[in-house]
């Protein structure tokens, strides 16, 4: 098993932050009116969508996609907002995030270019739901947008030692869960009559490869063996399995057998 110092030397800490101006706002006057009509204290809240601008909507979606990718190629720590990544993998992470970052900047630029016009049209479009206090100056809105990543070396001395031990355990637990969940899913799909998508195979293959690329922080032999043995069935093409029931069932049984032998079923 790796020492705490060895684990610290093998990983980096990473943060990922996004921010955006939110176009859904609480209308206090309308909320109070609804509650008064129904004789309730604070049961109703009227949320107004100030704009359905396409660039802003696309930006919210982009942030969610970027966060999913961030989680895919990192492991958790025991501190919110801070995740870990094996040394060397930060270059792949940085490249992916840089691509998202460029798209983020483009969408922000497009939205801000339209903002004054959107704000000027709002009184007519929103009618009685318009509240000028919810429409700040463009400079204030611009300051709400953020997209940043950061990579830091991992300390191990003092209190960091116990923090790192707990973080390594959390990382192992998540990796094991991802491996077992994707393997079980593939085995279930293969054993049924439903359509087999390539993504079911690719998802398992990806986790197997991550386990062999430094994500097995504590060199857990069970995770290492499972990932090694599951890689072969996960590397098949869906087309070669999709319509051959016997092959599907054999592959499903093999996956289940691997999980069973390693007490991961």
Image (spheres, grey):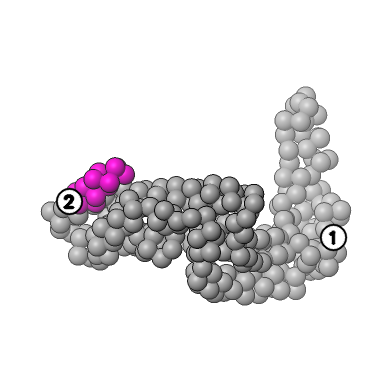
- Spatial distance from mark 1 to mark 2, Cα to Cα? 60 Å
> Hey, which residue is sitting farthest top in the picture?
39
Extreme residue in the left direction: 246
| Label 2 crowd (10 A; few <14 / some 14-19 / many >=20) | some
Label 1 Cα neighbours within 10 Å, binned few <14 / some 14-19 / many ≥20: few
Left/right placement of residue 168 relative to residue 243 reads: right
Residue picked out by circle 1: 136
Q: Residue at point 72% right, 34% down?
A: 44
Q: Which mark is residue 245?
A: none
Magenta span main SS: helix
Q: Is residue 8 left or right of residue 56?
A: left
Residue in front for this viewpoint, 18 or 104: 18
* SS at mark 1 in the image: loop
Q: Position of residue 255 (x, y in %)?
A: 24, 51
* Location of residue 250 with respect to 96 vertically, above or below: above
Is 206 on the left-hand or right-hand side of 260? right
Q: Which residue is mark 2?
A: 249
Instruction: Please name the residue shown 35% across and 48% down the image.
Output: 180
Assess whether mark 2 and mark 1 are in contact (beta carbons under 8 angstroms): no
Is 145 or 71 nearer to us in this picture?
71
Q: In the rendering, at what x and y percent does residue 23 appear?
A: 72, 56
Residue 3 included in the magenta stretch of the image = no
Give how far across and how far down residue 243 sits, in percent.
18, 59
Q: Which residues are magenta?
A: 253-265
């Amino acid at each position: 098993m790796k020492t705490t110092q060895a684990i610290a030397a093998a990983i980096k800490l990473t943060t990922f932050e996004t921010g955006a101006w939110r176009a859904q706002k609480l209308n206090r006057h309308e909320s109070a009116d609804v509650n008064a009509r129904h004789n309730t204290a604070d049961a109703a809240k009227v949320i107004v969508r100030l704009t359905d601008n396409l660039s802003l909507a696309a930006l919210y979606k982009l942030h969610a996609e970027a966060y999913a990718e961030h989680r895919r190629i990192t492991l958790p720590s025991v501190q919110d907002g801070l995740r870990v990544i094996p040394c060397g993998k930060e270059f792949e992470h940085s490249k992916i995030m840089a691509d998202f970052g460029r798209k983020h900047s483009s969408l922000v630029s497009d939205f801000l270019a339209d903002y004054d016009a959107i704000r000027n049209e709002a009184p007519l479009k929103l009618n009685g739901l318009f509240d000028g206090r919810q429409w700040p100056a463009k400079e204030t809105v611009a300051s709400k947008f953020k997209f940043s990543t950061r990579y830091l070396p991992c300390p191990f001395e003092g209190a960091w030692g116990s923090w790192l031990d707990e973080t390594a355990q959390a990382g192992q637990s998540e990796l094991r869960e991802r491996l077992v969940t994707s393997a079980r899913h593939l085995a279930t799909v293969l054993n049924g009559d439903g359509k087999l998508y390539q993504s079911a195979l690719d998802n398992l293959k990806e986790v197997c490869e991550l386990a062999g690329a430094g994500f097995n922080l504590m060199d857990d032999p069970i995770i290492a063996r499972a990932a090694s043995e599951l890689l072969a069935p996960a590397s098949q093409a869906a087309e070669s399995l999709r319509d051959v029931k016997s092959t599907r069932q054999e592959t499903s049984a093999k996956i289940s057998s691997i999980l069973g032998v390693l007490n991961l079923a």
